[in-house]
Amino acid sequence: DAGITQSPRYKITETGRQVTLMCHQTWSHSYMFWYRQDLGHGLRLIYYSAAADITDKGEVPDGYVVSRSKTENFPLTLESATRSQTSVYFCASSEVEDTQYFGPGTRLTVL
Amino acid sequence: GENVEQHPSTLSVQEGDSAVIKCTYSDSASNYFPWYKQELGKRPQLIIDIRSNVGEKKDQRIAVTLNKTAKHFSLHITETQPEDSAVYFCAASRWGSARQLTFGSGTQLTVLP
């Protein structure tokens, strides 16, 4: 589990501000994922990446931007934060056709 | 897209009893079904998974069964212990689809001592 980290762990921001959540993995996994977790909705996929410079939308991509210039990093940016984006964000990684391992999560509050 | 429904949303059992959590899925092409356990304030962690070429898989006190015809799968925990108390999530995906997991909404399991 120590192979995948997220920062910051907690973040409070205001509506309209840009926020970037970081995800770093040391396993050299090909795939990386961003999920948000809200009560009553379980985990919902925001974006995923199959390799560096290859990203694709998940179930709830609106309002989010991702990039992946290096295999080990997969930042998630909220370009103009809204209150509905208050959530716990989990990053995950996996090797091809293998188990997804989750990071510790970032709790984001948008005021 | 895939839709996964999970029941019950809360479950309380006495220590030593068994617990069963059920999930149904909509996409008949789904063929990979993991279960994750999430303790309060922690990350989800895989506890068991099953692929569609088998009907049942066991790992000590945990077992998962799959009925492809009915499109449902279940998690069985026997001899429950207080440390089994957590939120459990089922998920489904197609093997070979970048493992895009669709999760159920979770079951809060409480094991009463």
Image (spheres, coloured by chain):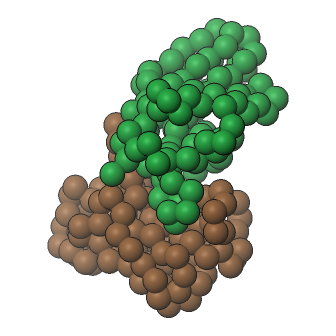
- Considering depth in this image, is A24 or B1 the residue closer to the camera? B1
Camera sees residue A4 = no
- Considering depth in this image, is B71 or A45 the residue closer to the camera? B71
Q: Is residue B80 above or below residue B17?
A: below
Q: Is residue B61 above or below residue A51?
A: above
- Considering depth in this image, is B101 or B105 the residue closer to the camera? B101
The residue lying at 44 percent from left, 42 percent from top is B28
Camera sees residue B35 = yes
Q: Is residue A110 left or right of residue B66?
A: left
The residue lying at 61 percent from left, 76 percent from top is A30
Q: Quadrant of residue B76?
A: top right
- Considering depth in this image, is A81 or B16 the residue closer to the camera? B16
Expressed as whole percent of the image width and height from the top left, the position of residue A14 reads 22, 67
Q: Quadrant of residue A76?
A: bottom left
The colour applied to the residues of chain A in this rendering is brown
Expressed as whole percent of the image width and height from the top left, the position of residue A77 reads 34, 76
Q: Quadrant of the C terminus of chain A?
A: bottom left
How many marks the image carries: the answer is 0
Expressed as whole percent of the image width and height from the top left, the position of residue B33 reads 57, 43
Q: Quadrant of the N terminus of chain A?
A: bottom right
Expressed as whole percent of the image width and height from the top left, the position of residue B73 reads 55, 30
Q: Is residue A2 left or right of residue B104?
A: right
Please give the letter of the chain rendered in green.
B
The residue lying at 50 percent from left, 43 percent from top is B91
The residue lying at 50 percent from left, 30 percent from top is B69
Single out the residue that lies furthest toward the front: B69
